[in-house]
Amino acid sequence: MKIALEIEGIPIKLEERLELDMYNPNIPRDMCLPENLEEGKFYNFHIKGWNIFPLSKPINLFSKGETNQLASIDITEQTTFLLAGNVHTLGKYYTRKVAKNESMD
Protein backbone atom coordinates (compact mmCIF):
# COMPACT_ATOMS: atom_id res chain seq x y z
CA MET A 1 0.00 0.00 0.00
CA LYS A 2 1.24 3.47 -0.82
CA ILE A 3 -0.26 6.58 0.72
CA ALA A 4 0.57 9.83 -1.05
CA LEU A 5 -0.07 13.23 0.44
CA GLU A 6 0.99 16.76 -0.11
CA ILE A 7 2.06 19.07 2.67
CA GLU A 8 2.54 22.73 1.75
CA GLY A 9 2.98 21.72 -1.90
CA ILE A 10 5.55 19.01 -1.17
CA PRO A 11 4.56 15.48 -2.30
CA ILE A 12 5.25 12.83 0.35
CA LYS A 13 4.85 9.05 -0.07
CA LEU A 14 4.24 6.76 2.89
CA GLU A 15 5.58 3.42 1.67
CA GLU A 16 5.01 -0.16 2.77
CA ARG A 17 7.36 -1.57 0.14
CA LEU A 18 10.82 -0.65 -1.09
CA GLU A 19 11.41 -0.74 -4.86
CA LEU A 20 15.02 -0.46 -5.99
CA ASP A 21 16.76 -0.29 -9.35
CA MET A 22 19.06 -3.18 -10.25
CA TYR A 23 21.33 -0.52 -11.75
CA ASN A 24 21.05 3.22 -12.17
CA PRO A 25 24.05 5.21 -13.45
CA ASN A 26 22.91 8.21 -11.38
CA ILE A 27 23.01 6.28 -8.08
CA PRO A 28 26.11 4.72 -6.48
CA ARG A 29 26.16 0.95 -7.14
CA ASP A 30 26.11 0.11 -3.40
CA MET A 31 22.79 1.98 -3.10
CA CYS A 32 21.04 -0.06 -5.83
CA LEU A 33 19.60 -3.55 -5.43
CA PRO A 34 22.43 -6.00 -4.67
CA GLU A 35 22.98 -8.83 -7.15
CA ASN A 36 22.92 -11.42 -4.36
CA LEU A 37 20.71 -10.61 -1.39
CA GLU A 38 21.66 -12.42 1.81
CA GLU A 39 19.55 -12.91 4.90
CA GLY A 40 20.76 -11.18 8.04
CA LYS A 41 22.74 -8.46 6.21
CA PHE A 42 22.38 -4.68 6.07
CA TYR A 43 22.21 -2.84 2.74
CA ASN A 44 22.00 0.83 1.73
CA PHE A 45 19.43 2.39 -0.59
CA HIS A 46 18.93 5.68 -2.45
CA ILE A 47 15.65 6.59 -4.13
CA LYS A 48 14.30 9.78 -5.62
CA GLY A 49 11.47 11.54 -3.81
CA TRP A 50 10.38 12.11 -0.24
CA ASN A 51 9.57 8.64 1.03
CA ILE A 52 8.69 7.62 4.56
CA PHE A 53 8.95 3.97 5.59
CA PRO A 54 7.69 2.32 8.79
CA LEU A 55 10.50 1.54 11.21
CA SER A 56 8.44 -0.69 13.47
CA LYS A 57 7.37 -3.46 11.09
CA PRO A 58 8.76 -5.49 8.18
CA ILE A 59 8.07 -4.37 4.61
CA ASN A 60 8.57 -6.03 1.23
CA LEU A 61 11.52 -5.51 -1.12
CA PHE A 62 11.01 -5.51 -4.91
CA SER A 63 13.07 -4.81 -7.99
CA LYS A 64 11.64 -1.64 -9.56
CA GLY A 65 8.77 -2.45 -11.91
CA GLU A 66 8.57 -6.13 -10.89
CA THR A 67 5.80 -7.93 -9.00
CA ASN A 68 7.75 -10.79 -7.39
CA GLN A 69 8.79 -10.01 -3.84
CA LEU A 70 12.53 -10.47 -3.31
CA ALA A 71 12.68 -10.27 0.48
CA SER A 72 11.09 -9.23 3.73
CA ILE A 73 13.11 -6.36 5.20
CA ASP A 74 13.28 -3.91 8.09
CA ILE A 75 14.09 -0.28 7.33
CA THR A 76 16.61 0.71 10.01
CA GLU A 77 17.53 4.23 8.86
CA GLN A 78 16.10 6.85 6.53
CA THR A 79 17.12 10.39 5.68
CA THR A 80 15.62 12.87 3.24
CA PHE A 81 17.75 15.54 1.57
CA LEU A 82 17.90 17.96 -1.37
CA LEU A 83 20.33 17.42 -4.24
CA ALA A 84 20.34 19.87 -7.15
CA GLY A 85 16.84 20.98 -6.20
CA ASN A 86 15.42 17.43 -6.10
CA VAL A 87 14.33 15.53 -2.99
CA HIS A 88 15.99 12.14 -2.34
CA THR A 89 15.70 9.48 0.36
CA LEU A 90 18.72 7.57 1.65
CA GLY A 91 18.50 4.69 4.05
CA LYS A 92 19.56 1.32 5.28
CA TYR A 93 17.64 -1.96 5.48
CA TYR A 94 18.13 -5.35 7.09
CA THR A 95 17.09 -8.51 5.24
CA ARG A 96 14.89 -10.74 7.41
CA LYS A 97 14.06 -13.36 4.79
CA VAL A 98 15.09 -13.70 1.14
CA ALA A 99 12.71 -15.34 -1.34
CA LYS A 100 14.10 -18.51 -2.84
CA ASN A 101 11.49 -19.21 -5.54
CA GLU A 102 8.79 -19.70 -2.92
CA SER A 103 5.96 -17.47 -1.78
CA MET A 104 6.85 -14.91 0.87
CA ASP A 105 3.28 -14.89 2.29
Image (cartoon, rainbow, N blue to C red):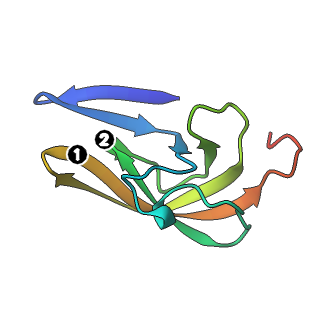
**Residue 20 image offset from top left, x and y in percent:** 53, 47
Q: Residues within 10 Å of mark 1 (few under 14, many from 20)?
A: some
**Residue 88 image offset from top left, x and y in percent:** 28, 49
Q: Nearer the N terminus, badge 2 or badge 1? A: 2
**Residue 17 image offset from top left, x and y in percent:** 55, 41
**Residue 47 image offset from top left, x and y in percent:** 39, 48
- At x 58% / y 55%, what residue is drawn? 33
Give the image quarter of residue 87.
top left
Q: Secondary structure at mark 2?
A: loop
Number of on-image labels:
2
**Residue wearing tag 1:** 87
Name, please, the residue furthest toward the right: 102
Q: Secondary structure at mark 1?
A: strand
Q: Nearer the viewer, residue 59 or 83?
A: 83
Q: Nearer the viewer, residue 28 or 87?
A: 28
From the viewer's perspective, tell me whether residue 9 is left or right of residue 39: left
- At x 17% / y 52%, what residue is drawn? 82
Type of the residue with mark 2 = Gly
Cα distance in 3D space between marks 2 and 1? 5 Å
Which numbered tag is attached to residue 36?
none
Type of the residue with mark 1 = Val
Q: Residues within 10 Å of mark 2 (few under 14, many from 20)?
A: some
- At x 55% / y 67%, what residue is drawn? 43
**Residue wearing tag 2:** 49
Pointers 2 and 1 in contact (C-beta within 8 Å):
yes
| Quadrant, the C terminus | top right
- At x 65% / y 33%, what residue is drawn? 66
